[in-house]
Image: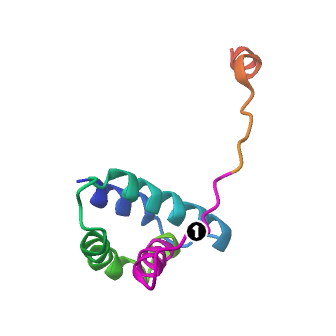
Amino acid sequence: MLLERTLSQLDIGPMPADRAVRLGEMGYLQWLGALRGSADYRAEAMRAYAMAEPLQRRSPAVAVFCDLLIDSTRGPIAALDLTFPLQQRRGGARARRAEL
């Protein structure tokens, strides 16, 4: 199941706060993208939170994921303030040739 895989990807232990925020947000987007269109969002979010909650004490990224789930179910519908990772060039063909 994708939720278990997402949580295992997030549960990698201590890390800097900025990295935990980025990973938690990407995990949330991955989970959100896997939901069926007909799914009850609130029920699915609470189910995901119930599975993630025991892991959040030892993993800051899972804690961010849990916070996003809770924030998304409170109050009226509103846009979440999510940031995407900056794009980075990795060298392309020149870097691959230099490795040879």
Image height of 4 relative to 67, above or below: above
Give the residue at x 74% y 22%. Answer: 95
Q: Quadrant of the N terminus?
A: bottom left
Q: Residue 18: percent from the left, percent from the top?
A: 67, 68
In front: 58, or 66? 66
Direction from residue 72 to residue 22 in the image, left or right: right
Residue 88 in which image quadrant: top right
Dot 1 falls on a residue whose secondary structure is helix
Judged from this view, the residue extending furthest toward the front is: 76
Residue 49 in which image quadrant: bottom left
Q: Residue 45: percent from the left, percent from the top?
A: 32, 72
Q: Residues within 10 Å of mark 1 (few under 14, many from 20)?
A: many
In front: 1, or 82? 82
Mark 1, residue position: 20
Give the residue at x 45% y 62%. Answer: 28
Q: Residue 77: percent from the left, percent from the top?
A: 46, 74
Give the residue at x 74% y 34%. Answer: 89
Q: Is residue 62 magenta?
A: no
Q: Residue 13: percent from the left, percent from the top?
A: 48, 70
In front: 45, or 23? 45
Q: Is residue 69 magenta?
A: yes
Residue 79 in which image quadrant: bottom right
Direction from residue 9 to residue 82 in the image, left or right: right
Q: How is the image coloured?
A: rainbow
**Which segment did they paint magenta?**
63-85
Image height of 98 relative to 85, above or below: above
Q: Amino acid at mark 1?
A: Ala
Direction from residue 23 to residue 17 in the image, left or right: right
